[in-house]
Image (cartoon, grey):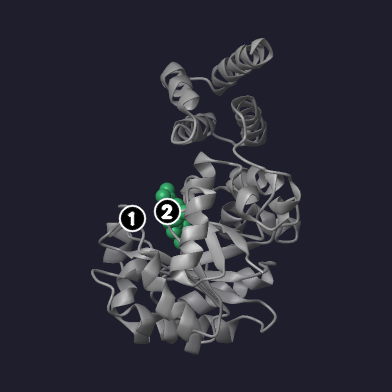
Amino acid sequence: MTTVTLAPMEGVVDVYMRELLTGIGGFDLCVSEFVRVSQHLFPAAVFYRNCPELLTGGKTSSGVPVHVQIMGGEPSVMAENAAYVAELGAPGIDINFGCPAKTVNRHDAGATLLQWPDRLNEIVSAVRRAVPASIPVSAKMRLGFSEKSLALENALAIECAGASKLTVHARTKLEGYRAPAHWEYLQPLAEKLEIPVVANGEIWTKDDYSQCLALSGCAHVMVGRGVIARPSLGLEISTEGEQFFQLGLFDWPKILNLIIDYYNLTKSMENENRQMGRLKQWIKLLGRTYGQSSVLFDQIRRFEDPMKIVQEVRKELYRSMGDQLAS
Ligand SMILES: Cc1cc2nc3c(=O)[nH]c(=O)nc-3n(C[C@H](O)[C@H](O)[C@H](O)COP(=O)(O)O)c2cc1C
């Protein structure tokens, strides 16, 4: 059965977004934003901040598990932190070998490690040994650092180390986020590995999803920006969504209601500026699918109070419902 995972996205897919999107449905699993592990064991507060779901059984309130992602290049420190976050109740640990950020790569973590399959193996092995066997350890990588020749070797190194699953963002670090994603390069990995290979990158619609499965030979997908811009996407592509007759794109009033729900969820954020930043960011990103959201973004971009933003969203909701009734 195909599974759909909500991608980790630092600064975008936080606890509130996970709550909202898993509430809509279509997701089997979430992965938290990364915790950058460098020299020492973090206190519990760091993991609780990154993944507050640890306090509620490691699941969102819709019951979708959230695996905690860690990132670093030192096997023993990664292992120590992984063991601790497992103790705190993480239902799974994911290791990030895909982050392209220069500061991260300069400090020996993320995608830079894709240049050395042995190091991937050492890190995953150390984490696997440190975490109880009942807790899955997975990894997420790109096709390579500057080119793709080590993709299979890296994937096998991760599998041999005992990972239970591998997600592959179908681009190199150098390719950044430039379209297209090279789904076809996942095929040899999906063929040769015994563990599930999860395809990731540039799935924006149900058609992209079908094409990705066909070209990659993978049975599982992870979606990130696609579902932020099109919140129905998880349901549209999941088995769960099949029960809804001809489920398609949510209409604009439904999206406005979701923005209001997100505002309500983010009200518990301590920092109002951060809440406002997240609201503006989501309204902007929705513009890729909903032209109306780009117009709305232009109206609210200079607002300095989250309440003013949500007032504008409510006004737009009444306007658009009126338009719907009139048509
Ligand atoms: C703003 C942003 C933050 C991200 N943060 C993470 C992260 O914390 N961990 C990770 O493994 N990948 C991270 N990614 C990569 C995504 O998980 C995903 O691999 C990438 O966006 C491609 O998938 P998509 O086309 O479905 O978005 C991030 C991507 C973006 C755009």
Q: Quadrant of ligand 1?
A: bottom left
User: Dividing the picture into quarters, in which one does residue 31 lie?
Assistant: bottom right
Tell me how far mark 2 sits from mark 1, CA to CA: 7 Å
Q: Residue 158, position in %: x, y?
A: 46, 82
Q: Residue 271, position in %: x, y?
A: 54, 34
Q: Is residue 315 above or below residue 88?
A: above
Q: Earlier in the sequence, mark 2 or mark 1?
A: 1
Secondary element at tag 2: loop
Q: State the mark number for residue 9.
A: none
Is the residue under label 1 in contact with that under label 2 (CB below 8 Å)? yes
User: Depth check: 67 or 244 in front?
Assistant: 244
Q: Is residue 217 left or right of residue 233?
A: left
Q: Amino acid at mark 1?
A: Pro
Q: Is residue 217 above or below residue 63?
A: below
Identify the residue position indicated by label 1 in the image.
180
Secondary element at tag 1: loop
Identify the residue position indicated by label 2 in the image.
202
Q: Residue 62, position in %: x, y?
A: 75, 51
- Callout 1 environment at 10 Å: few (<14), some (14 to 19), or many (20+)? few
User: Is there any visible trace of residue 54 in the rendered image?
Assistant: yes
Is the residue marked 1 within 8 Å of ligand 1, measured from its CB? no
User: Is there any visible trace of residue 109 in the rendered image?
Assistant: no
Q: Is residue 36 above or below residue 228?
A: below
Residue appearing at x 68%, y 68% in the figure: 91
Q: In the rendered image, which quarter contains the N terminus?
A: bottom right
Is the residue marked 2 within 8 Å of ligand 1, measured from its CB? yes
Residue appearing at x 57%, y 87% in the figure: 129
Residue appearing at x 62%, y 35% in the figure: 250
Q: Amino acid at mark 2?
A: Glu
